[in-house]
Amino acid sequence: MSRSPCPSDSVRSAAVVNEEIRELWQRSGGRLSPEDEEQYQRLLVEWAAATDPGSRSAA
C-alpha cells in the first residue's frame, strides 16, 4: 500500500512522517528500490519541514 504525500497546505507532524519512514524501511528490508528511494527523499523533505520551528504556524 503506497501513501501519497499530503497537499502542501496540510502539514503532518514529524512523528507521523517519521512513522511512515520507519514503515518504508521495514517493508523494504533495508534496501530501497528506486521508487522507494524517491518516496524516502520526499518524506525526508517533509520531515525536515515538520521539525523546522520556523515553518510551524501558531495553533
Image (cartoon, rainbow, N blue to C red):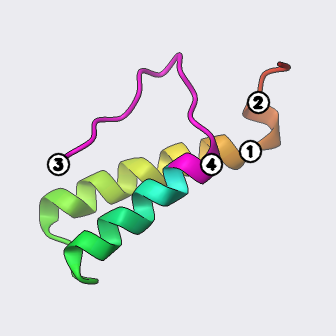
Per the image, the residue denoted by label 1 is 52
Tell me which label, 4 or 3, sits earlier in the chain: 3
**Mark 3 Cα shell of 10 Å, populated few (<14), some (14-19), many (≥20):** few
Element at badge 4?
helix
Majority secondary structure of magenta residues: loop
Per the image, the residue denoted by label 4 is 14
Q: Nearer the viewer, mark 3 or mark 2?
A: 3
3D distance between C-alphas at marks 4 and 3: 21 Å
Element at badge 3?
loop
3D distance between C-alphas at marks 1 and 4: 10 Å
Q: Does the magenta-highlighted stretch encompass residue 6?
A: yes
Tell me which label, 2 or 4, sits earlier in the chain: 4
3D distance between C-alphas at marks 3 and 2: 29 Å
Q: Nearer the viewer, mark 2 or mark 4?
A: 4
Amino acid of disc 3 = Met
Amino acid of disc 1 = Asp
Q: Are marks 3 and 1 in contact (CB under 8 Å)?
A: no
**Quarter of the rendering occupied by the C terminus:** top right
Amino acid of disc 4 = Ala
Per the image, the residue denoted by label 2 is 56
Element at badge 1?
loop
Amino acid of disc 2 = Arg
**Mark 2 Cα shell of 10 Å, populated few (<14), some (14-19), many (≥20):** few
3D distance between C-alphas at marks 1 and 2: 7 Å
Determine which of the numbered discs, if any, sits on residue 1 in the image.
3
Q: Does the magenta-highlighted stretch encompass residue 51?
A: no
The x, y position of residue 15, in whole percent, is: 61, 52
Tell me which label, 1 or 4, sits earlier in the chain: 4
Q: Are marks 1 and 4 in contact (CB under 8 Å)?
A: no
The x, y position of residue 45, in whole percent, is: 50, 48
Compared with residue 55, is residue 41 higher up or lower down, i.e. above or below? below
